[in-house]
Amino acid sequence: MTTIYLKPHKEDSLRRFHPWVFSGAIARVLLDAGHPGNAPAEGELVSVYSSMGEVLGVGHWQIGSIAVRILAFGVETLPADFWNERIRAAYQVREALGLTPNHQSPITNHQYNDTFRLIHGEGDFLPGLIVDVYADTAVVQAHSIGMHLCRKEIAKALMDEIPQVQNVYYKSDDTLPFKAKIDGDKIGYLAMTDCEKADEFWSTENGLQFRIDWLRGQKTGFFIDQRENRALVERYAANKDVLNMFCYTGGFSLYALRGGAKSVDSVDVSQKAIDLVNINVARNFPNDPRHHAYAADAFDFLSDKITNHKSQITNYDLIILDPPAFAKHRDAVKNALRGYQRINAKAIEMIRPGGILFTFSCSQAVDKEAFRLAVFSAAAQVGRKVRILHQLHQPQDHPINIYHPEGEYLKGLVLYVE
Ligand code: SAH
């Protein structure tokens, strides 16, 4: 195996379990005699030593300023049961949180749940790997070539270790570094025991059923990261006229309906998403006249709602704004903040006095303070007084590694609008 020697004193951060080796910390790279290239290949497993020859760990090599992402500390090679052990450990945490179907707990109000994030990259000590579990299907996303090369071992460990998992679908066409040379398929089933047709498929979150389309849907098929925030909407929804803007497959809408909303309007620009919202509402609340769904652009809907969309309601008591990441990169932050201000101003304008706004940003590049400022500027722009009732974030199954603050991306505010 390729071995990496660090410069003197560069081992300290690894001893504290920081998972990255920067290229500037490397003194020497020693390739095996039989190595096919003259440098380690992207995704190759390498072992890392201090300048004194002490074993520090083993990880995936990457081309770029982060040269190695450590998978296991204090060993020169990955233990034989590495993937099983890591996946088992992650599952035990979800079990303790009451998110797994065999282990419902007071934390989840004893509601049946088989939808959860099993692996959140660095947050589960598996840098570059995301795994979401939907009933009997795990959807795996690799963000590094190293994880891509390990996809079959990962699938096998998922089948071995997670009692509910019968199928493993791999979906990395949008997530692998686009410049890298990639061997093998970026999408497709890695394991399938149960030929479940995606069209008949239901996954349950806190007792509500959702059709998850991992083949054609966004990301892994569903936004598990809003589970706890949806539960909070349920607590506020009774007797309210609710607007769920950027609704995707209707997550917040179902919770609002269960919470006793007077009416719920769901809006998304994607007709495919709206079709799924209607399917999900029909499944959980058959023939419920309180719900209406509109395929429309957010700004159009908020500007010109009645004439374009024939909604009965001109003002809402509760609005949820959960837009896509407006800033995908640091250099897009300024425009993104303008976008957040604009959409929040529109929403705040439409809220009845004493109404509530749930507003979110999932742009990792936009920090909490900047987002809050954009929302406050929106309120000032339309002359409404607002107060913060809750500050929201991603849930427990999206843990944040203390050395990888970038793992924290979802932020939300619940505002009381006078
Ligand atoms: N709240 C959702 C997730 C939202 S993801 C949930 O709980 O599951 C963001 C959504 O915004 C996507 O479904 C996307 O189709 C939609 N979207 C993107 N641009 C839009 C626009 N201009 N107007 C309305 N919806 C838009």
Image (cartoon, rainbow, N blue to C red):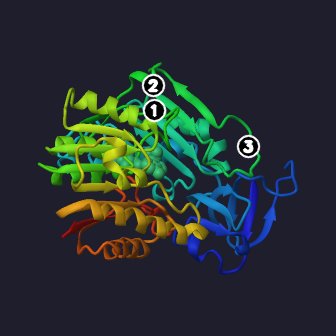
Of the image marks 2 and 1, the number of the one nearer the N terminus: 2
For the residue pair 330 and 275, the one nearer the viewer reads as 275
Compared to residue 412, the image places residue 163 above or below, namely: above
User: What residue sits right under mark 1 in the picture?
Assistant: 213
Which residue corresponds to mark 3?
Answer: 182
Q: Does residue 89 appear anywhere in the picture?
A: no
Q: Residue at the front extreme?
A: 307
Residue at x-position 59% and y-position 30%? 188
Element at badge 2?
helix
N-terminal-most mark, 3 or 1: 3
Find out whether the residues at labels 2 and 1 contact each other: C-beta distance under 8 Å.
yes
**How far apart, in angstroms, are the residues tagged by discs 2 and 3?**
27 Å
Q: Position of residue 104 (x, y in %)?
A: 22, 41
Q: How far is disc 2 from disc 1 in space, using C-alphas?
A: 6 Å
Indicate if the residue with disc 3 has its beta carbon within 8 Å of ligand 1: no
Front: mark 2 or 3? 2
Residue plotted at (43% across, 62% down) = 400
Secondary structure at numbered mark 1 = loop
**Tag 3 secondary structure:** loop
Which kind of residue does numbered mark 2 sit on?
Ala
Instruction: Kindly indicate the quadrant of the structure image that contains residue 377.
Output: bottom left
At which x and y percent is residue 177? 67, 52
Q: Amino acid at mark 3?
A: Ile
The residue that label 2 is drawn on is: 198
Residue that sits furthest to the bottom in the current view:
9
Q: Position of residue 119 (x, y in %)?
A: 46, 48
Which quadrant holds residue 263? top left
Percent position (x, y) of residue 317?
19, 56
